[in-house]
Image (cartoon, rainbow, N blue to C red):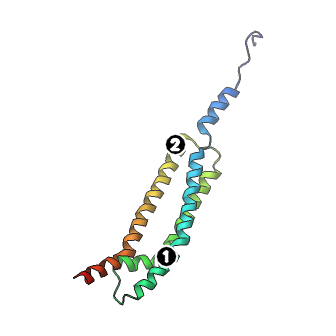
């Protein structure tokens, strides 16, 4: 039997600590949607810039380096990045709780996605300016 002089045991305090441990991480949510927005902008801007480079390269009258032709031929890949980022952001957003393990996994996934995007960006810059650098070497000699 319960002692009437002791306060009742509350499960609310236990529920609050459980929720705070497994609540959704706003930093993870915001970071995911910022990456989506960035990739959408990149997917819109890359074809515009790429078309200008293609007309510039057509005026060279020389064969393009393999890296440049590979990049031009695989330009559809830039439209896949926002789809992947959006799928990841939707997955993070729709999940009702974020455990510490889940936060770590998704944080590492977002970081890997950003690192991959930076590497692809460096690849794109190298691929698009390589013909100009080669032409400069030929003209300079």
Q: Say whether residue 112 is left or right of residue 138.
A: right
Horizontal and vertical percent position of residue 1: 76, 12
- Residue nearer the viewer, 66 or 53: 53
Residue that lies at the very extreme toward the bottom in this rendered image: 61
Q: Estimate the spatial distance between the alpha carbons at disc 2 and disc 1, rounded to whole Å.
A: 40 Å
Residue that lies at the very extreme toward the front in this rendered image: 140
Q: Secondary structure at mark 2?
A: helix
Which image quadrant is residue 58 in? bottom left
First in sequence, mark 2 or 1: give its number: 1
At label 1, counting other C-alpha atoms closer than 10 Å, the crowd grade (few under 14, some 14-19, many 20 or more) is few
| Position of the C terminus by quadrant | bottom left
Residue that lies at the very extreme toward the left in this rendered image: 141
Horizontal and vertical percent position of residue 5: 76, 9
Q: Is residue 131 above or below residue 6?
A: below
Residue 49: which numbered mark, if any? 1
- Residue nearer the viewer, 111 or 129: 129
Q: Residue at x 43, y 66 (%)?
A: 121
Horizontal and vertical percent position of residue 125: 40, 70
At label 2, counting other C-alpha atoms closer than 10 Å, the crowd grade (few under 14, some 14-19, many 20 or more) is few
Q: Which residue is mark 2?
A: 101
Figure label count = 2
Q: Residue at x 64, y 36 (%)?
A: 19
Whether residue 79 is visible, yes or no, is: no
């Amino acid at each position: 039997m319960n002692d009437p002089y002791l306060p009742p045991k509350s499960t609310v305090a236990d529920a609050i600590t459980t929720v705070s441990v497994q609540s959704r991480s706003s930093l993870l949510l915001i970071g995911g949607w910022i990456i989506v927005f960035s990739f959408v902008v990149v997917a819109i801007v890359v074809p515009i810039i790429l078309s200008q480079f293609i007309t510039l390269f057509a005026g060279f009258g020389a064969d393009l380096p393999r890296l440049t032709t590979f990049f031009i031929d695989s330009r559809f890949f830039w439209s896949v990045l926002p789809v992947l980022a959006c799928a990841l952001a939707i997955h993070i957003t729709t999940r009702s709780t974020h455990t510490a393990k889940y936060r770590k996994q998704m944080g590492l996934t977002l970081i890997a996605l950003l690192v991959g995007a930076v590497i692809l960006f460096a690849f794109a810059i190298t691929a698009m300016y390589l013909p100009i650098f080669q032409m400069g070497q030929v003209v300079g000699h």
